[in-house]
Image (cartoon, grey):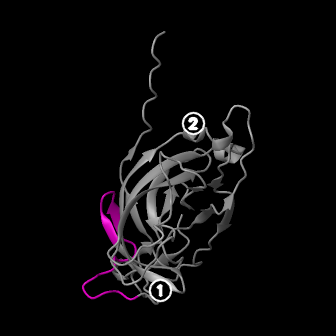
C-alpha cells in the first residue's frame, strides 16, 4: 500500500522501529557475570511516519531527484545517487549525510551482503519476549567518506526494511558481539577514511528482511538495496560419544 508518491515513485508507507534504549541484563545463574554485564540495545519503541495523503503528486520526479544535500558540501566530481534508486547487494550509493547540524559529509555506502541469524545467537543476553520473537539479520556494509567533513562516531545511516514495509534501526551492544559488532563509524572518520562493518537488525514478529534502505527524509524516496539473503549456518553436528 502506498500513501505517498513523488512523481511516479512510491514512497515507503513506513512504521519505524527505533532501538535507542539499553535494556538492563538481569543476572542468571546459568550465565557468567562478565557476559551478563552487557546490555543489548533493542527495538522497543515505534512511531508511524505519515505518508502524503490524497492522489495529488508533486511535480518533481523522484527518478531524477538527487538525495537532499541540506548544508552538505558535495565535492567537485562527486555525483549523488538519485533518490528512489534500486541497487543490488554489492553496489554503492553516494549520499549526503548530516548526523547533526554541526557535522556532515558525503558517504559512499555499499551493502555487501545479508545473512539471516537465529535468536539462539543472542543466548548470552537476557531477552524480553518481544526480542525472542524477532529474527536477527546481519548486514555487511562498506563505508567511505568521499566528502569534506569528519562524521566519526556517527551511526551508519542504513535501515532494514521488512515484508510489512517497516523500517528497522540497527541494534547495538554495550559489549562485544563478535558475530556482528554493529558499531557506529570509528571515533574519527575524516575525508578519504574507509571502514567495513556488520550491522544487526532484529526484525519483529519473526519477520523477513526484504531490503536495506537509506532515506534521509520522509518526503524523499529511499535508496534501497536488495538481493539474496544467506540462510543461517547449519548447526554443527555433535560428535558421537
Is residue 92 visible in the rendered image? The answer is yes
Residue 45, image x and y in percent? Answer: 69, 61
Residue 77 drawn in magenta: yes
Residues at marks 2 and 1 touching, judged by CB atoms closer than 8 Å: no
What residue is rendered at 45% in x and 74% in y? Answer: 221
What residue is rendered at 49% in x and 46% in y? Answer: 178
Q: Residues within 10 Å of mark 2 (few under 14, many from 20)?
A: few
Q: Which mark is residue 120?
A: 2
Residue 121, image x and y in percent? Answer: 54, 39
Is residue 132 visible in the rendered image? The answer is no
What residue is rendered at 61% in x and 55% in y? Answer: 174
What residue is rendered at 39% in x and 82% in y? Answer: 61
In the rendered image of this protein, does residue 7 appear above or below residue 184? below
Q: Residues within 10 Å of mark 1 (few under 14, many from 20)?
A: few
Q: Secondary structure at mark 1?
A: loop
Q: Which mark is residue 58?
A: 1
In the rendered image of this protein, does residue 21 appear above or below residue 120? below
Q: Nearer the viewer, mark 2 or mark 1?
A: 2
Taking 200 as reference, is 174 left or right? right
Name the quadrant of the N terminus: bottom right
Q: Earlier in the sequence, mark 2 or mark 1?
A: 1
Q: Main secondary structure of the magenta part?
A: loop
Q: Which mark is residue 229?
A: none
Residue 32, image x and y in percent? Answer: 66, 37
Question: Separation of disc 2 and disc 1 at Cα?
Answer: 47 Å
Q: Name the residue furthest top.
A: 241
Quadrant for residue 14, please give it: bottom right
Residues in magenta, as a range? 73-93
In the rendered image of this protein, does residue 199 appear above or below residue 64? above
Q: Name the residue furthest left.
A: 77
Amino acid at each position: 500500500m502506498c500513501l505517498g508518491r513523488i512523481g511516479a515513485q512510491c514512497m515507503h508507507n513506513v512504521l519505524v522501529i527505533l532501538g535507542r534504549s539499553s535494556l538492563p541484563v538481569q543476572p542468571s545463574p546459568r550465565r557468567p557475570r562478565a557476559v551478563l554485564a552487557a546490555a543489548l540495545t533493542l527495538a522497543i519503541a515505534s512511531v508511524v511516519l505519515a505518508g502524503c495523503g490524497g492522489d495529488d503528486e508533486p511535480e518533481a520526479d523522484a527518478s531524477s531527484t538527487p538525495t537532499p544535500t541540506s548544508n552538505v558540501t558535495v565535492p567537485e566530481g562527486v555525483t549523488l545517487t538519485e533518490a528512489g534508486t534500486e541497487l543490488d547487494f554489492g553496489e554503492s550509493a553516494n549520499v549526503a549525510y548530516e548526523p547533526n547540524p554541526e557535522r556532515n559529509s558525503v558517504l559512499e555506502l555499499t551493502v555487501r551482503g545479508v545473512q539471516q541469524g537465529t535468536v539462539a545467537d543472542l543466548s548470552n543476553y537476557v531477552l524480553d519476549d518481544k526480542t525472542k520473537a524477532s529474527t536477527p539479520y546481519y548486514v555487511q556494509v562498506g563505508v567511505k567518506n568521499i566528502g569534506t567533513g569528519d562524521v566519526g562516531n556517527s551511526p551508519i545511516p542504513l535501515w532494514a526494511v521488512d515484508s510489512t514495509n517497516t523500517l528497522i534501526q540497527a541494534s547495538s551492544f554495550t559489549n562485544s558481539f563478535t558475530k556482528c559488532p554493529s558499531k557506529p563509524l570509528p571515533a574519527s572518520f575524516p575525508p578519504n577514511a574507509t571502514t567495513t562493518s556488520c550491522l544487526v537488525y532484529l526484525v519483529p514478529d519473526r519477520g523477513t528482511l526484504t531490503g536495506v534502505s537509506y532515506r534521509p527524509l520522509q518526503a524523499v524516496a529511499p535508496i534501497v538495496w536488495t538481493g539474496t539473503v544467506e540462510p543461517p549456518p547449519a548447526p554443527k553436528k555433535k560428535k558421537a560419544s
